[in-house]
Image (cartoon, rainbow, N blue to C red):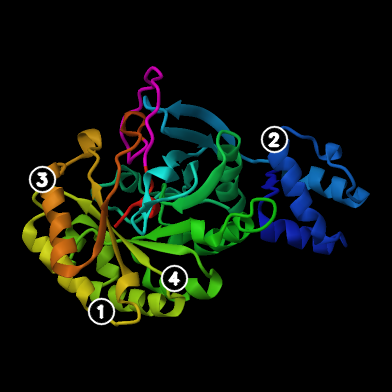
Amino acid sequence: MTFRSVFDAAFIRTEFDQAGINTQFIPSIWKYVVQNPNCEWREIPSLPSAAYSLLSSKFKPCTSVVDSVLDSIDQITTKLLIKLQNGASVEAVIMRYDTRLGKYGGKPRLGGPRSTLCISSQVGCKMGCTFCATGSMGFKSNLSTGEIVEQLVHASRLSPIRNVVFMGMGEPLNNYNALVEAIRVMTAFPFQLSPKKITVSTVGIIHAINKLHGDLQNINLAVSLHAPVQDIRCQIMPAARAFPLEKLMNSLAEYQKKSQQKIFIEYIMLDGVNDEEQHAHQLGRLLDTFEVVRFKFVFRVINLIPFNPIGTLSKFGTSGDEKVTKFQTILRSSYNIRTTVRKQMGQDISGACGQLVINLPNKKPPTLTDIEDLHL
């Protein structure tokens, strides 16, 4: 018999309702499991007797296990290889930052060290992005709500998690129902993450973007744009053929109008493909179409991402620092677009897409500033 994760929220609520058990016990069960990872159901205090029987017959505290934990040489990044009960594996990555390194209004931010968790939503991915090793796997399966939440459970035992980004394996919006339910669990007791500290990344699944704000308010949306024109986008992202750039941008404008929140534009820098000065100007003009006064300074936040080579699968080169800086300068000076360059983290443990893993000796960790802490 296949047991379900206790964090499969809809399933456990339905089972409790059918058994006549008050669903208000569920958050306290989750809290106990988080605090006591190897618990037996009978150890949880003050539950109705029927709850113990139901939990024992249909649920596990966690259906996944941490198969390995790999730390980067600088100790900033930790990758978890998580084995699911069906034998498949996914990765989750903890990234550590220091808020004090950022500035806001020209002054240093308050706060201190914190951790962001990068979560997977699928085993493999059907989007087929040619610069991504996960895309080369093809699509294997969707993760359940519980399997998504369990990544947070496992990571929380290694580091206090304040931010969650759905930028791991898979296209989150292709596993829409499980994604929405998982985020609702993460923002409720006992996790209580702020929705504003959760970011969902997508290649641009238009029909899902159109309903996302109605289902999840106040979360951040990041769009993997990666090219300023449809032709280049289709070359490096085959799935883009189903989501024409003009329709995608219209959908994003409508989403942003409803949510009144910034949308992060992710742009991977591929040498000689999309990183020339003309591409920077094309991107600037594309985003200039959204210069509605009320939203002008909210919509456009671009995160330039240096390409991480993926071994023999890689047919692209990494843009040089000079090219990246010039690209950023054009967007900032010519189009007044807030532009950051993503810090490269965890390459030595395949914390980025699909690199070979070598666990290297420990060294004293430096500190980094997170994107949201940068003075832009």
Q: Main secondary structure of the magenta part?
A: loop
Which residue in the protein does label 4 denote?
208
Mark 4 or mark 1: which is in front? 1
Q: Earlier in the sequence, mark 3 or mark 2?
A: 2
Q: Is residue 83 left or right of residue 26?
A: left
The answer to whether residue 222 shows anywhere in this view is yes
Q: Secondary structure at mark 3?
A: helix
Which residue in the protein does label 1 denote?
291
Q: Amino acid at mark 2?
A: Pro
Within-10-Å neighbours for mark 2: few <14, some 14–19, many 20+? few
Mark 2 or mark 4: which is in front? 2
Within-10-Å neighbours for mark 3: few <14, some 14–19, many 20+? few
Q: What's the distance in space between the residues labelled 1 and 2, CA to CA?
A: 50 Å
Q: What's the distance in space between the residues labelled 3 and 4, CA to CA?
A: 37 Å
Residue 37: numbered disc: 2
The spot of residue 211 in percent (x, y) is: 48, 75
Q: Amino acid at mark 1?
A: Glu
Q: Earlier in the sequence, mark 1 or mark 2?
A: 2
Residue segment shown in magenta:
351-368
The spot of residue 23 in percent (x, y) is: 80, 60
